[in-house]
Each structure stands twice: as C-alpha cells, then as structure tokens.
Image (cartoon, grey):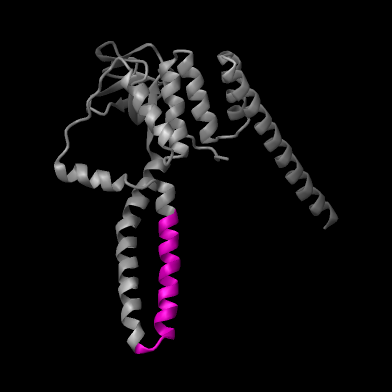
C-alpha cells in the first residue's frame, strides 16, 4: 500500500515537473519570438511539441513564427493543427483564411447545391467541443424535466412537457452532427503541401504528371500506398503525391 502511494506521488511529481518545464519553454519561446529570434522560437515551440504536449496556443505561435520566416506551408500547417485542437478560436481561423489567401494556388471549392450549402453551414455552426457540452447540458436537463414531471401535480406538467419536447428536438438535431464530426476526426486525414512545388501523379511513383500544386495547398487524403498518398483538393482534382512533400494536420496523440 505504501509502495503504491509512493508510485502515485512520483507520477504526480513528474507530471508537475513536466508541466513546469513546458511553461518555462513556452515563455522562453515567446520571448525569442518577441525579440525577432525566430529560429530559436521555432526550435523551442517544436521542443514542447516533441515532448508530447499538444496545445493549440503552441501550434498557433509556431505558425506565427513560420509566417515571419516566410515559410507559408509550415505556417498554414501549424495554424490548421491549432484549429484542429481548438475550433472555437476566431484568431486561429482568421490566420488560416489570411495565409491561405497568400498561396499561389487559388483553389475554388467544387460547386454544391443550395440545400447542401445550408446544411453544411448548420453542421459547422458549433464546434465539436460546444456540441459535446450542449448535448451534456440537454441530457441533464431532460433528467431534471423527467424528475419534475413525475414529482409535480398534473396542472404543472404541461409546461414541463413543452420544455422536455424542446430539449429532445434540440438533442435530435445536434446529435447526428456531433457523431459525424467525431467520425471525421477519428478517421479522416488531411495535409498541407510543404514543398515549394509538388507534382501530382497518375499513380504511386508514376511517370505522368496530372497537375502541379504549390506550398500551402490543402489535400484530403483518401488512401496511402507505400510513400505515396492518393489525395484530393477542394475543387475535386485528385492524384498521387509523395508523403514527404506533405505535413499531416490531425494530431492523433493525447492533447494536453
């Protein structure tokens, strides 16, 4: 029992020490950035990430550092990673839109029907985190409504029923969107082109170039074969690209 307690205390101490180290490195990186020492700042932010700490602020600041170094692809990649960790941050979203406007390839998304556009807007209205919070609140509210419904007399039950139905309708509306987003985050994979120029081929290591893209272009990866990925742009164009020329956005490790 004493040994078990000692192990727990040791783990907590190590975690606290690691957290202090992370905060200290973050402060040092921020100071380096403010002083214009962008190489040092990038190295320090990267050191935090390599240690296993995945935080939206770290990726956002790393994106800012790469932007100052005129590394547009790396900047967009890290802004996208920050957004993947925190979809509700307006500054991150604004920086993604600004930097993507600077890319050489002006990729116009494929046209969609008005109905699908409206549906997609509703789907993206709330972030995954906000949807999770709202679902939890609605479930608690429903439990309270049910308790109140069976506790109160008949004349007060009509109001409880109205609120209960409203909560159920909201839940039914939000839950499918939440489940789709969860599935997308678990299984989908997207990437940013980091090479100054990348050739999109007809097959893995193929000889025919279908089209060319440049630094900062965003792909959705459909499948991988050896060192290549079959990927598509927002406009529907697709082909094979060398994985070495890409930076994957999604962070599958635990985010602190």
Q: Where, by quadrant of the figure, is residue 42 drawn?
A: top right
Looking at the image, residue 84 lies above or below residue 225: below
Q: Nearer the viewer, residue 246 or 148?
A: 148
Q: Quadrant of the image for the C terminus?
A: top right
Q: Position of residue 180 (x, y in %)?
A: 34, 48
Which residue appears at 40% of the width and 14% of the height? 195
Q: Main secondary structure of the magenta part?
A: helix
Q: Residue furthest front?
A: 34
Q: Nearer the viewer, residue 48 or 60?
A: 60
Q: Position of residue 70 (x, y in %)?
A: 44, 13
Looking at the image, residue 67 lies above or below residue 252: above
Q: Position of residue 130 (x, y in %)?
A: 42, 50
Which residue appears at 38% of the width and 11% of the height? 196
Which residue appears at 40% of the width and 36% of the height? 90
**Is residue 150 rendered magenta in the image?**
yes
Left or right of residue 180, residue 209 in this image: left
Q: Where, by quadrant of the figure, is residue 232 drawn?
A: top left
Left or right of residue 117, residue 224 in this image: right
The residue stretch that appears in magenta: 133-154
Which residue appears at 58% of the width and 25% of the height? 45
**Is residue 45 rendered magenta in the image?**
no
Q: Where, by quadrant of the figure, is residue 111 drawn?
A: top left
């Amino acid at each position: 029992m004493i040994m078990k307690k000692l192990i727990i205390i040791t783990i907590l101490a190590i975690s606290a020490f690691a957290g202090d180290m992370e905060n200290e490195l973050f402060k040092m990186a921020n100071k380096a950035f403010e002083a214009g020492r962008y190489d040092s700042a990038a190295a320090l932010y990267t050191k935090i990430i390599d240690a296993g700490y995945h935080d939206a602020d770290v990726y956002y600041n790393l994106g800012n550092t790469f932007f100052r170094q005129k590394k547009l692809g790396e900047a967009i990649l890290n802004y996208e990673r920050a957004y993947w960790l925190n979809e509700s941050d307006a500054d991150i979203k604004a920086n993604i839109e600004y930097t993507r406007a600077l890319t050489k390839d002006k990729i116009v998304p494929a046209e969609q029907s008005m109905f699908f556009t409206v549906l997609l807007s509703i789907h993206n209205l709330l972030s995954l985190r906000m949807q999770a919070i709202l679902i939890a609140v609605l479930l608690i509210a429903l439990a309270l409504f049910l308790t109140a419904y069976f506790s109160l007399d008949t004349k007060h039950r009509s109001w409880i029923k109205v609120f209960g139905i409203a909560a159920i309708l909201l839940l039914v509306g939000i839950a499918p969107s939440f489940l789709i987003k969860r599935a997308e985050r678990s299984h989908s994979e997207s990437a940013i082109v980091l090479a100054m120029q990348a050739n999109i081929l007809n097959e893995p290591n193929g000889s025919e170039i279908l089209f060319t893209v440049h630094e900062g272009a965003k792909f959705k990866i459909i499948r991988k074969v050896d060192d290549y990925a079959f990927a598509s742009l927002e406009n529907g164009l697709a082909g094979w690209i060398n994985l070495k020329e890409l930076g994957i956005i999604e962070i599958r490790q635990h985010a602190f």
